[in-house]
Image (tube, grey):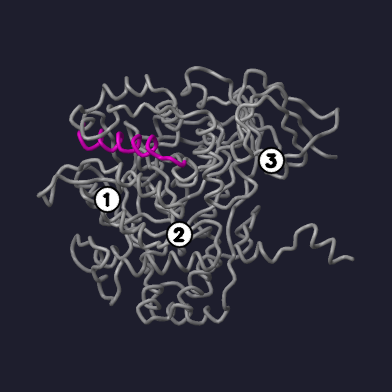
Amino acid sequence: MRTMLRIVNGRVYDPANGVDGEVRDVCIADGRIVADVAPEAGRIDARGMAVMPGGVDMHCHIAGSKVNLARKLQPEDHRDDVLARTAVTRSGVGGTVPSTFTTGYRYAMLGYTTAMEAAVPPIFARHTLEELHDTPIIDKGFYALMGNNVLLFKLLEKGRREEFRNAVAWLLCASKAYTAKLVNPGGDEAWKGRRNANVTQLDEKIESFDLTPRQVIGALIEAVDELGLPHPAHIHCNNLGHSGNFETTLETMRIADGHRAHITHIQFHSYGQVAGKSSSEPTSKAREIADYVNAHPNISADVGQVMFGKATAMTADAPLGYMLSRLAKGKWINADAEHESGCGIVPFTYQDRVYTHALQWAIGLELFLMAKDPWRMVLSTDHPNGGSFMSYPKLIRLLMDREFRKQEMAKINPRALRETVLADGLDREYTMSEIAIITRAGPARLLGLARKGHLGVGADADITIYEEQDDKETMFATPRYVIKDGQLIIEDHEIRADHEGRVLHVAPEHDPAIAEVVRAFFEDYYSIRFENYPVDDSYLGKHEQVPTRQQAAAVPTASESTAAGH
């Protein structure tokens, strides 16, 4: 029997299909949006409510070894935020790094139905998938760390570009990942080789290799593009958090040279410095960064907004973790993932009266408010690095409510505010449609998820219904209804049903002979057997393989299939 539902009388915001607040019906059958349903279908009367696609968080840290280490590091966070078991939900704990069950429930309680874990060494993919299986309701996937992979460095150094591309594809298939992630390319080798060392220039030699970060970035951008992955290379630039790093960010975007590239948590990469000083408090270079992104349609970004309060710095950028530990002066973790990545974890608190923290908060808002194309500058806090995903409703209010933003600006360090243009007539207020873009339609499009982020016929029936309120923070914190794959998960603000989301991954075509190249490297350098490295398909459980550009082109359209039948 078909599961059918009709949502009536709601004000629909579906920017991917040009629908901006029109009162219209949305119909659901068997987990997808359809043109119409039978009269006996169930109904939701959404009068006085806003109907949107389910939210899509394209950059967060919610599963895997580093996340689990961060949980263990902060038991005090969990004691203060316990989620009791109910007839429908499992028990868990919250804090800045919630347990798996709590993560899925709390995303759903905000109206989010998809979230992508942003940094996983392929060697830890199996652990990550196990935690994603324990993360209920939402669809999810992860990006595989490759910007410090020694095997890839060796192939690239020797000019074996075809094998390099095939190795990238093999790693994605073996780990069941979604795209390639770069974090501080080249920095790990310096960190491992010399005390507290790092790379600071894109043309600086990588420790032990005749190779530069520029070459690594360019090669991975091109390889991902050539493989036709649905999402481009996802780049955490070198020099994150350092004064003057905007120049590195601009140069990294130039390396793309027309290829698609995504710069993640770009707020952390938008800092200038006082002229003539090699080390100083940062200044805002949001204007320069925003202007470049606005002028180059091949570049996209998520903001990585800082929100005041507790956070957890959690990064594959090991030198950055060390730097933050010196600032926080508390407990921290630093780890190394064999030949693939580093890791740093530091509990952190952002304070509105601290100059640097206030400036970071202001720069994020500048980037949002100066973005001319919201489809390419989307919402994130780099959860939990800039703040918890639970702060998204407040961030939305900051963008939609000019007067509220001014009230919050009055609370921060005044010297930091003067370094920005927030108080100089930057009075833009985001519309409901623009919020739908930066939280739903935009991330889905950037991820290449054709059935997400919109309410057109054929889309996944992932839908959030909010009661319209003047206080946008309250509105977006408490959806009245959430529907996942056509199933009513939240009704009257409460979780009424559980649901298992899908794991999203890619499987790009590649020469199978590359496995022997990888095998030889494993025999020489890895601590585990080659046969134990690839993740077996049985680990995927409920999943969806998102096609590459080449795979999508090879699938005949309905009309082509009909013609072939004749």
Quadrant in the picture for residue 440: top right
Contact check, label 1 and label 3, Cβ < 8 Å: no
Q: Position of residue 413 (x, y in %)?
A: 21, 28
Residue at the location (36% across, 47% down)? 266
Q: Nearer the viewer, residue 311 or 559?
A: 559
Give x and y (percent) for residue 231. 52, 56
Residue range (magenta): 354-373
Residue labelled with disc 3: 456
**Residue 538, percent across and down?**
64, 61
Give the left or right position of residue 37, taking residue 348 as reference: right
What secondary structure is marked by label 1?
A: helix
Q: CA distance from mark 1 to mark 2?
A: 19 Å
Per the image, label 3 sits on a secondary structure element best described as loop
Residue sticking out furthest to the front: 295
| Amino acid, disc 2 | Ala
Q: In the rendered image of this protein, does residue 331 appear above or below residue 468?
A: below
Residue underneath mark 1: 246
In this rendering, the label closer to the viewer, 1 or 2? 1
Q: Is residue 458 magenta?
A: no
Q: Residue at x 57, y 20 (%)?
A: 468
Q: Which residue is mark 2?
A: 233
Against 268, residue 337 (above or below) is below
Q: What amino acid is labelled 1 in the image?
A: Phe
Q: Amino acid at mark 3?
A: Gly
Crowding near pointer 2: few (<14 within 10 Å), some, many (20+)? many
**Residue 58 percent location from the top left of the image:** 49, 46
